[in-house]
Image: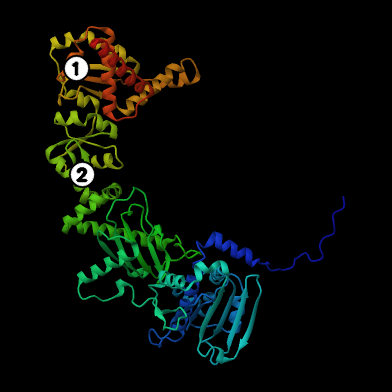
Amino acid sequence: MTLPDAPSNPAGTDRTFQVDLRGLVDLLSHHLYSSPRVYLRELLQNAVDALTARHSLEPAAPAGSFGIRLYADGSVVRVEDDGVGLTEADVHAFLATIGRSSKRAEQVAEQRGDFIGQFGIGLLSCFLVADEIHVVSRSARTPDAPAVEWRGRGDGSYTVRTLRASARPRPGTTVTLTPRADAGEWTRPAQVWALAGHFGSLLRHPVTFDDGTGGTGVAVNPEPAPWARAYPTPGARSRALAAYGEEVLGFTPLDTIELDLPAVGLKGIACVLPQAVPAGRRHGHRVHVKGMLLSEQADEILPEWAFFVRCVVDAESLRPTASRESLYEDDTLAAVRDVLAEGLRAWIARAAASDPDLLARFLHAHHLAVKSLAVHDDEILRMLLPWLPFETTDGHTTLDEFARTHRTVLVTSSVEEFRQVAAIASAAGLGVVNGGYTYDRELVHRLPEIRPQTSVADLDPATLTAHLDPVDRETELAAAAYLARAREALAVFDCDVALRTFQPASAPALLVDSREARHERTRSQLAREQEGGLWGDILGALRQEAPRAQLILNQLNPLVRTAVAIDEPELARTSAEALYGQAALLSRRPLRPAESSLINRSFLDLLAHALRKDN
């Protein structure tokens, strides 16, 4: 077998990638950026970074001496800055090379943390709204540097030429876009003004906007961030922060928590929502990086349990992702999340210690959030567990109040079990807490950690039935025939029948049946059906005596006293089925198809019997 000749250049030839710029822009628009509106954010960001570099070059320049000017008249969008500018070599190196950023240059590499952008693809976002980008720049690094013009087009071509110094008298950069016809939604003067305020309201450099109508430029960010301003009193500061939170978040905060983490240069506010939110629903937070809005939906800034607040923050040291629309998950972000969480815990502690009215309003709205926190936070547990509301046989009340009247607290494992027994347990003097809601059962069992004199136990059906008074022997014997017929009628539901006396007398019957018992009966039934097969052997090995439901009839109820005296077998059977169906309905648990059929049948049979009797 003859092998083909080896190539003449075994070492290979270095080649460069051929970039389809239109394809790359399409990729950015559909997979990196959430909307074409980000083009203005990218232009503002480049201008801010250029100003940052200019200040590094001229640290003695007065604050506010360099700024950014926006212009939009419907035909063009222009962004001009007094930043560090670009030389012709810089233009070739940075504007004409996809993915390279001037912030990566060696002369400013040590200052990368001072810049918002880190990825060098921001200028490409302008192709989302325009087919051509026109840049005129003059470098502040080189004395008497000429102006340089760069025109980049969406087909991947560009031109560079040197202009006279008079074309740009001062250092800086001007970027001009001629919008496409289909980009008017994002480039109209009113929209550019709105986008500038949206993204740049907290920028530290002055930004002005001119709509081409002949007036002077209007300040986009006339004031510093509200937490950076001076106020005459703490109360005035608190009111100003709350007003700002309401303005940007759209709701009146229950309270406002000021956030300050000097280690990462983070400042801002957390606004407590005035109404409850669904468990696990995380609101996005408004995050700025060095004054530039990064995202309004940054839920990673706080832990999951903190869904009762929304934040507005500005940070220096958090890293944006490539799209600059979310935060990069790293150790710094994890540390910030932990410190902010501690700040929220401290606020809860302060409210508990010094503002009971605020605490009560907070817990009324957000007790589920606090319960989720208390499960994993012993400090919050000790501080707030006695004050958290629970559904009990005494109504909705705090555990502290409930434990004062019940030394032994019983807790159900499900909502339906609580509803089955609540009225009867209350009349019997038992203190029962509904443990069927998220976190409740686990938290109630930890009550003795706070109140050692209180004991907590799961409610067992036997505990309840033990508190029901037995009937006397003569009454039991008189009702024996009826009870036997009732047991026979309800055997299909694995239900026993007993006669007791209990309050309230208006309750004719109580169905005691736990979810676990129903599951065990279902498993046992399956084992019987599979007798002799593989599954029969497996399930048979696990078989136990299946626990039975129990229908407890109330001898104090007039209807029950009439029913147990019935001699007619069919009518006795029908009445027992009707009492079972009514008790099953009162338990509020899901009905099995056979039970629904029984309720309908027993109602119709009793109606037919009543009509026959009347005739």
Identified by mark 1, the residue type is Val
Q: Which residue is mark 1?
A: 560
Residue 587 position within the rendered picture, expressed as x and y whole percent measured from the top left? 27, 28
Whether the residues at callouts 2 and 1 have beta carbons within 8 Å, the answer is no
Identified by mark 2, the residue type is Glu
Is residue 545 in view from this perspective? no
Query: The C terminus lies in which quarter of the figure?
Result: top left
The residue closer to the viewer here, 545 or 283, is 283
Q: CA distance from mark 2 to mark 1?
A: 45 Å
Question: Looking at the picture, does residue 392 appear above or below residue 362?
Answer: above
**Along the horizontal axis of the image, is 42 left or right of 368?**
right
To which quarter of the image does residue 500 belong? top left
Question: Looking at the picture, does residue 133 appear above or below residue 326?
Answer: below
To which quarter of the image does residue 405 belong? top left
Q: Which comes sooner in the sequence, label 2 or label 1? A: 2
To which quarter of the image does residue 396 belong? top left
Residue 96 position within the rendered picture, expressed as x and y whole percent measured from the top left? 62, 75
**Along the horizontal axis of the image, is 590 left or right of 91?**
left
The residue closer to the viewer here, 290 or 373, is 290
Is residue 225 in view from this perspective? yes
Q: Which residue is mark 2?
A: 449
Element on which disc 2 rests: helix
Q: Which residue lies at the image location 39% right of the left edge and 20% below the top edge?
A: 524
